[in-house]
Image (cartoon, grey):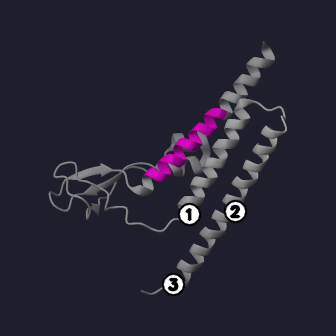
Amino acid sequence: MKIKIEDILMRAVKIAVAIALLLFAALLALGELQMVTHNIASTFHQHVGTNLLVAICLCMAYMLLRRSIDPVPDVHCPRCRTLGGHKFAPQYRGSISHAALHFGGFLFSIFYSGGRQQRFRCRECKELFYSHTALSRGYRLLFLLSAAFIVNSIWSEFSEFWAAGG
């Protein structure tokens, strides 16, 4: 097995980004602990937002550091129930969701696109089907955490607006 310089460089970049994400998550967690233990006035939304951001950072770091896995073995054909060995089938839909791009930005759109089901062709019955893979489940988790962070931020803005008016 030949190891290319590009693979080594990409792995080094992934490790560096994951370390930066873990340090950022640790700093956020320490700041949150400081706020909670010293009774610094902050709203529930700020605590939830910080905890969601820590969860997003930890999830992203895990996805960068984990070993590459074959996404196909855990996929069952819904027709004949064959496990693994399926081929990826081409998809004829766009790779970027414009609604997700508009609502949450570039990363939100990437998480949405990565979290969608993949299209496969069964190796036994040749049936076309969609299924989640281990990687798409990870991206789905990142998408849901990001969506919760965005909804929490919007709710926080509205609650401050309502509190100021009432």
Amino acid type, callout 3: Lys
Amino acid type, callout 1: Leu
Nearer to us: label 2 or label 3: 2
Position of 154 with respect to 77 (left or right) is right
How far apart are labels 2 and 3 at the CA level?
A: 25 Å
Say whether residue 42 is visible: yes
Q: Which residue is mark 3?
A: 4
Q: Residue at x 44, y 57 (%)?
A: 135
Q: Earlier in the sequence, mark 1 or mark 3?
A: 3
- Between residues 130 and 76, which one lies in front from this camera angle? 76
Residue 119 location, x and y as percent?
A: 31, 54
Name the quadrant of the N terminus.
Answer: bottom left
* Residue span colored magenta: 137-152
- Disc 3: CA contacts within 10 A as few (<14), some (14-19) or many (>=20): few
Q: Residue at x 44, y 51 (%)?
A: 137
Q: Earlier in the sequence, mark 2 or mark 1?
A: 2
Q: Does the magenta portion include 10?
A: no
| Most distant residue in the bottom direction | 2
Q: Which residue is mark 1?
A: 64
* Mark identifier at residue 20: 2
Position of 70 with respect to 129 (left or right) is right
Name the secondary structure under disc 2: helix
Name the quadrant of the C terminus.
Answer: top right
| Most distant residue in the front direction | 37
Q: Residue at x 32, y 50 (%)?
A: 131
Which corner quadrant of the image does residue 71 belong to?
bottom left
Residue 88 location, x and y as percent?
A: 31, 61
* Mark identifier at residue 163: none
* Secondary structure mostly taken by the magenta-highlighted segment of the chain: helix
Q: Residue at x 72, y 54 (%)?
A: 26
